[in-house]
Image: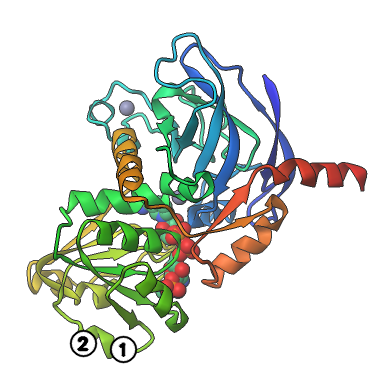
Amino acid sequence: MTRTHAYAAPAAGKPLAPHTIERREPGPSDVEIDVLFCGVCHSDIHQVRDEWTGATFPMVPGHEIVGRVRRVGASVAHHVVGDLVGVGCMVDSCRACTPCREDTEQFCESGAAWTYNGTEMDRATPTYGGYSKRVVVAERFVLKVPAGLDPAAAAPLLCAGITTYSPLRQWNCKQGDRVAVVGLGGLGHMAVKLAVAMGAQVTVFSTSKSKEPDARRLGATAFAETKDPAVFTTLAGRFDMVLDTVSAKHDYDLYLGLLRPRGVMVVVGVPPEPTPVGAFSLIKGNRRLAGSLIGGVRETQEMLDFCGAHGIVADVEIIPIDRINDAYERMLRGDVHYRFVIDMATLNETLNETLNA
Ligand code: NAP
Ligand code: ZN
Ligand code: ZN
């Protein structure tokens, strides 16, 4: 075991603070990684606040990890010391069930080992995420970060990137499609970049009028401020796809009305409360309402390679780890442009200050 510095929430809703965890010695097929950067996902906030219930503490969040390989086990074939690698929302799965064999480990019938707030496949050892100096991960769940991508700005691809890439691919987003992206936060801004790269015409639906210039800079051709109810009538029936990234409760019926006949609304945002959906919102025009959960390992690598080929990374604000609690508050106010990424080098400095205080 190796002692590793980290930042953890000691209990539901409590501020994150310095903490120490144990990481296992790398086994034959494990990769030990020095974490360089970790993105801050809204799912971190939901879980630290136990908004989805069942959270376990202390919790070390973080599932948008980029780092350098420090050590590899004897049978590791695909990664060597010094490689720039990524780890997303999963660190293991059973690897034998149908979903695992079909490269959708997120649906593993035994339950995937989530990167944090979960357990390893032994169902006993808690998992701790990327707000830490070092992780040890099974080789199959370690991704290659393409050369040429900035490591800090690539970190959010490991969750925000794959979570928006996967539904765009599942629903065959293509040249000329009209895509509505709802919510311009971490996921939303990746959705805009990826859909634009796939050739779509993107309209951003946002509660924040101030984000319009950014939406256009990211490649959107139109912007709708959702505080104005008129946008839902003037833009009704226009879109092939609505990609909903909103983290708080809102009215799905309003957004279903934006779809053309047989269009699809894909929900990726996870408001803690359920949302009613009127039958007519679906029946009129044979509209479809779907969900999407991150993406499998193979698709995550495909997404990273797509981003490498198109030069796509997140727009990031790099923060020292002692600003994490403030970053959560800013995200809750919609004040994120467009992903906070923790520079993990600052964890040592913070700990030294704590020790010297
Ligand atoms: P984020 O950066 O905080 O962005 C969420 C955006 O939603 C905000 O920037 C805001 O955009 C909009 N919003 C917030 N409150 C709203 C409200 N009351 N009404 C309308 N719009 C509101 O969060 P994120 O990291 O992108 O994550 C978004 C959601 O996706 C979270 O619920 C997260 O847990 C979930 N998620 C799901 C998956 C999956 O696999 N399905 C993976 C990762 C994350 P505007 O200012 O533009 O309105
Ligand atoms: Zn996430
Ligand atoms: Zn499985």
Residue 310: image location, x then y, percent = 31, 50
Does 6 sit above or below residue 273? above
Residue 1: image location, x then y, percent = 67, 19
Viewer-proximal residue, 191 or 18?
191
Q: Estimate how packed mark 1 is, as few (under 14), some (14 to 19) or many (20 or more) residues with alpha carbons within 10 Å.
A: few
Residue 294: image location, x then y, percent = 35, 46
Q: Could you tell me the amino acid type at mark 1?
A: Pro
Does 29 sit above or below residue 136? above
Q: Is residue 29 left or right of residue 289?
A: right
The residue shown at (41%, 70%) is 249
Q: Could you tell me the amino acid type at mark 2?
A: Thr
Residue 238: name its quadrant. bottom left
Q: Are marks 1 and 2 in contact (CB under 8 Å)?
A: yes
Viewer-proximal residue, 49 or 53?
49
The residue shown at (42%, 52%) is 313
The residue shown at (76%, 40%) is 348
Dot 1 falls on a residue whose secondary structure is loop
Q: Which residue is mark 1?
A: 229
